[in-house]
Image (cartoon, rainbow, N blue to C red):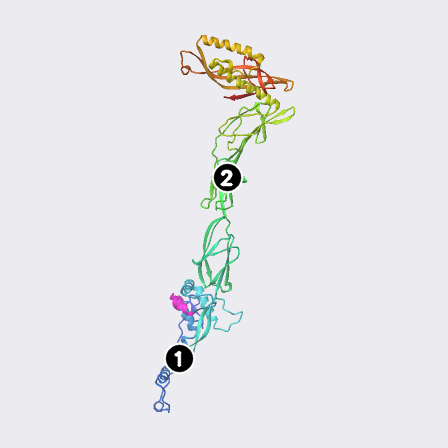
Amino acid sequence: MKFCTGCGEKIENGKRHCTSCGAPIASNPEPQETTQHTASQRSRKPQIRKLPLFIVVAILLIGIGGGGTYAHLDRQFQPENTIDQFQKAITEHDAAQLTALLKANAAAMTIDESAAERLIALLANDAQLMSTTLDDLEHTLEPQDAETAAPGPLALEHTGNKWLFFDDYKITVEPFYLELEASQQGTTFQLDGQDAETFSGEIVEIGPITPGEYSLTAEYDGEDGQFSEQQTVTVYDREKTTLSHAHEYEGFFVTVESSEEDSYLLVNGEEVGPVATVGEYGPVTVDGSTELQAVVEFPAGKEYSEAVTVTSDQTHYALDFDYEDFFITVSSNQTNSRLLVNGEEEGYISDIEEYGPVSVANSVELQAVAELPAGEAYSEAVVITSDKAHYDLHIETEEAELEEGMFEAVNRHTRQWVQAYETKNTDYFNELHPSYAYDYVQGIDENFSRMRSDHTNYQGEVVATEFDLVTVDTTGNIDNGVHGEVNVQITFNSSYYDSDQSPGSVPKKISRSQWTYYFTYDSGAEKWLITGQDELDNWNPSDPRRFEF
């Protein structure tokens, strides 16, 4: 009974190494026969021819040491000795010795010391695999068939004769191949720092390679993101000389949030869904072609967050809004006109004191619509901007044009009134109908005469006019004569000062007056002419329209 001197395990008969730890088992040397030579044998001298010196020397060497030397060399070239040398090279980490014992079983595969070192690193650190490998090598000494062929990647092979007399054995190494593919085209594979191979839709094959452990790196840097993955690939199973490896990459995902809980996520301008419920979104590109934005819709338009571009170094994006609540007022020249905001009706303009909040990002459009005898009529659409808070939505119709003409006539006349009083000159008045002009101008001249005698002067400007649209009334038609009237409040910023005073020394004050103006339409001049005016006792407009000066 034998036991391993390395680990103490029981050794089966006929085994040349420990199946547990792989240590070699010492064998008892066979006793050598000794030959005794008698004196009579030594004294016999055979009759031979004289040979050249070098032949004699060779024969003498063989004759003298032939028996022992041949037996020694014969043992050195036995296949078992090759296995022992292989085991010794692994145990002693002798890459040079191992390289001399190995033979590539593929013309394109090179066995060098780096390949030997790779094999040593694998077997020296795995006693069980080492034991199995030695068993497989010894198994190759037996008669082989397809069913009993050694499963390992190494096999003992008779490769010819050495020095004519002795058999020569090598350990052949099976080639291995890696078949690689990836979910993203453009993925590169690199085996132990060798030149990278790029996956372009077809399987990437790397090989032939020798048994051992390899570091396989898969990298991707493209429109779908970036990744780098490294793993160790063990190559040794002879039944799998071609190993397949597929790298799956799910892509680049982002998370989003917004300062407006009702906002929606836009990806390159396309609405995806509410930001609050989107959660993780992807896969997205990271090459600068993916843009994220949030949008929130108010009653009067949409507001957008600043657009951001997805990059590979950021996975979370805050899509916040930066705006102020903005409110507007609206008016129209048509009684009972209705307000449209982006085509949606919001109610009668006369009932809307203030409207908002509205967007000022050029996304809100205002329009007025009114029901006229000839059908619905619309004002021109206007876009809300941040520099304007009041919008007058004028509906262009024949009736509307006539009404607008009355407002313009009053506004022009009011400016002329200020100019006339500042200069004490009635020549400025040209909005008066001849039937009214004489009496009106005469009364103004009397005022100017009193101012001259009192050495009084006037300075001022018109601040605003405000018309009550409910009081607009027109009768007749342009062909047969049109008459109209409207109530208006006029706001002045003015003052009177003496001739010995400078205008700047007397401050101006706001004053208001309310009037009913009467008109006749002059079809020849295509304008309204004022035919009279009455001062009002009170001012309470139902549907005001204001003009700022």
Quadrant that contains the N terminus:
bottom left
Up/down of 172 relative to 347, above or below: below
Viewer-proximal residue, 432 or 174?
A: 432
The quadrant in which residue 330 appears is top right
* Circle number at residue 70: 1
Residue range of the region highlighted in magenta in the rendering: 89-101
* Circle number at residue 430: none
Viewer-proximal residue, 216 or 5?
A: 216
State yes or no: residue 91 in magenta. Answer: yes
Up/down of 208 relative to 166, above or below: above
Q: Is residue 200 visible?
A: yes
Give the prevailing secondary structure in the magenta stretch: helix
For the residues labelled 2 and 1, say whether their Cβ atoms are less than 8 Å apart.
Answer: no
* Circle number at residue 293: 2
The residue sitting at 62% across, 23% down in the picture is 398
| Image spot of residue 285 (x, y percent) | 50, 46
Kind of residue at disc 2: Gln
Kind of residue at disc 1: Tyr
The residue sitting at 52% across, 26% down in the picture is 328
Q: Is residue 24 visible?
A: no
The residue sitting at 54% across, 23% down in the picture is 353
Q: Which of the marked residues, 2 or 1, is nearer the chain's N terminus?
A: 1
Q: Is residue 69 left or right of residue 353?
A: left
